[in-house]
Image (spheres, helix red, strand yellow):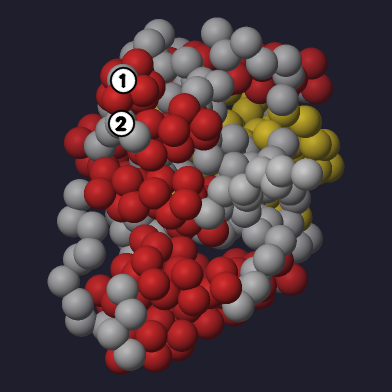
Amino acid sequence: MTGNDTVGKLVDLGSGNFAYLQEGGSWGWSNAGLVTSEGVSLLVDTLFDLDLTRQMLGAFGAATPAAARIETLINTHNDGDHTHGNQLVPGARIIASSAAAEAMAAGVQPGTFTQLLDNAAELGDLGTFLHRNFGAFTFDDIDLVLPTETFVDKLTVTVGTKSVELIQVGPAHTPGDVIAYVPEDNTVFAGDILFNGSHPVIWAGPPSRWVDACDLILGWDAETIVPGHGPMATNDDVRRLKEYFLTLIELGGELRQKGLTPWEAAEHVTSRGMWPTWGESERLIVNFASVYQQLGDEPTFPDPMDGLTAMAQFSVAHEPKETIS
């Protein structure tokens, strides 16, 4: 058990659709969605641990009887905060892109999180960072359930009489990111293609793919947009994220030419006060590394754990210092 009180908020989107938003939207605190029609439902993502996923399913169940008949589960990508609760939706067809399914099978497993947290005291800055950001979650009771169906590029599924279009836009955040679009209701479940109010993190890239994904969403002019993290979004939020990546690409090219490392580029941005209200500025390190790679450099962090360690060191180094009066 996480030991948390209920941390999610159910949002009735109308037309039989719902979102489940977790406050703050920081590391691990992801969102999910439910699409219903004719008494059945489709779930977009599960959460980071079983207790949180149970709370979410309970909230959906209290809102609509269709939640008792989840026929389809979409995993928008491979990260654990969108997949670790899969075992709590038995009998559902679980769909992801082929790239996401491969990454899920080969990537960080729930037991690894347990081991890292158990040894946090010995890991220095990385341990401090992991305990602060992931210590509220429980991973030792998770049996990771992989997708049962995969696709490449596009797939249309039905829930009752509604169509849900699944479009692979990765590699961007991860190797196989998928957006779920409900044309009948002009509703988008963006997964982690949309972080609202915090820096995104480019685990896969290239950044230009993320710009294209933003353009895809904007082309729908959607009335309702559910981000993977953070509060409900608008098209203006999508435009802001697109401008973020365009700025990173342009600025990253300039800073690379000047010989700045990704860490130094992140320092440059934070010292200038860019995006001052966005959380998780440590992600700028791996984001600039991805920009540099798109421009021709070898990967700065070939092992994702190296990138996580660098972000941890940056985060700890930039913690607000206590003042002595």
Q: Is residue 292 left or right of residue 45?
A: left
Left or right for 151, reference 134: left
Give me the residue at 53% from left, 74% from top: 269
- Where's the N terminus, which quadrant? top right
Residue 288, image x, y percentages: 38, 71
Would you identify the image quadrant in which residue 4 lies? top right
Q: Position of residue 89 (x, y in %)?
A: 50, 17
**Front in this rendered view, residue 256 or 290:** 256
| Count of number-bearing discs | 2
Judge left or right: residue 195 versus residue 308.
right
Where does the image place residue 75, in percent across and percent down from the top left? 45, 38
Three-letter residue code for mark 1: Asn
Q: Is residue 186 visible?
A: no
Quarter of the image that includes the C terminus: top right
Quarter residue 94 falls in: top left
What is the CA distance from the residue labelled 1 to the residue labelled 2? Answer: 7 Å
Which residue is tagged 2? 123
Secondary structure beneath label 1 = loop
Instruction: Report the residue marked by disc 1.
Output: 119
Q: Secondary structure at mark 2?
A: loop
